[in-house]
Image: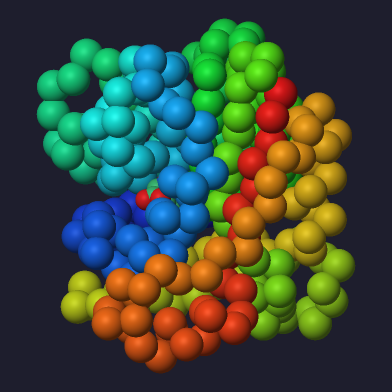
């Protein structure tokens, strides 16, 4: 399998990402509270954690009563970390898969809920991915994702053309974790986020441009002030 930009970006960065994932302000006090605020009750549900990374959401879902979780990621190093984090739990199935490709492991209408937190930025064309998510979701089920906000990420545009979907590379320094780590991802206009959802068949149910929670302030006062005024991430919830 040709390596995706997600795997290229995360295979050397996985351990460093995992080391700070639980406490880094942008995750713990910004994206995660926003994502959790959009989740329906998870008790007894069969859930796809699409792009599970080090398994933080998988663990949360299990702790909150999910019946079973299929945790998928393209980066083997991430799956290894997630497996260690979760330990032996028969409710979880880990799978290496590229979410840009058909989800051959999943049946039609298999899942009650699909979450995809901070993963889609590494996939160029969301159309095929969302059609697959729609296929494997039960009728009445929810799909919730978070991604870079189109306005925020436009500052990384090399072309200066808002309407393009563009690959860009950032050198991430990850608090106390060395680096810089080259991370490639795509920015895209808002219509390239919304239309693939609508075309796949989802009813767009909620859009959230979150603000950081209070704990962010002590962790990173400068970014806290910025994120109170400017968006960083965007979240969408669709229903089948
Ligand atoms: C920023 S991390 C987010 C991880 C996790 N969802 C979280 O919130 O902690 C991005 C994850 O997406 C995964 N990823 C990137 N491209 C992918 C693809 N095409 N298919 C599956 N996973 C992918 C990476 O390996 C990485 O684990």
Q: Quadrant of the C terminus?
A: top right
Q: Is residue 58 left or right of residue 134?
A: left
Q: Nearer the viewer, residue 67 or 117?
A: 67
Q: Residue at x 47, y 87 (%)?
A: 225
Asked if 70 appears above or below 122 in the picture, the reply is above
Residue 110 point in image, percent of width and height: 55, 11
Asked if 8 appears above or below 57 in the picture, the reply is below
In this view of the protein, can residue 141 be seen by the observer? yes
Residue 91 occupies quadrant: top left
Residue 160 point in image, percent of width and height: 80, 82
Q: Residue at x 29, y 54 (%)?
A: 14
Q: Nearer the viewer, residue 171 or 2?
A: 171
Residue 224 occupies quadrant: bottom left
In this view of the protein, can residue 4 be seen by the observer? no
Q: Residue at x 61, y 53 (%)?
A: 235
Q: Residue at x 42, y 26 (%)?
A: 42
Residue 126 point in image, percent of width and height: 71, 43
**Count of marks overlaid on the render:** 0
Q: Is residue 186 left or right of residue 106?
A: right
């Amino acid at each position: 399998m040709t390596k995706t930009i997600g795997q290229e970006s995360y295979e050397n960065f996985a351990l460093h990402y995992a080391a700070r994932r639980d406490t880094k302000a942008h995750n713990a006090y910004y994206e995660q509270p926003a994502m959790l605020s959009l989740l329906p009750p998870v008790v007894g549900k069969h859930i796809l954690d699409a792009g599970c990374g080090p398994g933080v959401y998988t663990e949360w879902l299990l702790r909150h009563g999910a019946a079973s979780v299929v945790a998928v990621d393209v980066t083997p190093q991430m799956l290894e970390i997630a497996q260690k984090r979760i330990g032996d739990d028969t409710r979880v199935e880990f799978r290496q898969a590229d979410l840009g490709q058909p989800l051959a492991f999943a049946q039609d209408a298999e899942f009650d809920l699909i979450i995809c937190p901070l993963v889609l930025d590494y996939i160029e064309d969301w159309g095929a991915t969302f059609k697959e998510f729609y296929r494997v979701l039960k009728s009445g089920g929810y799909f919730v994702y978070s991604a870079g906000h189109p306005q925020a990420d436009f500052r990384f545009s090399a072309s200066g053309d808002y309407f393009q979907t563009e690959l860009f590379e950032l050198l991430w320094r990850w608090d106390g974790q060395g680096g810089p780590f080259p991370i490639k991802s795509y920015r895209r206009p808002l219509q390239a986020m919304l239309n693939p959802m609508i075309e796949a068949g989802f009813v767009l149910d909620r859009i959230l441009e979150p603000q950081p929670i209070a704990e962010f302030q002590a962790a990173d006062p400068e970014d806290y002030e910025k994120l109170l005024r400017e968006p960083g991430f965007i979240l969408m919830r669709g229903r089948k």
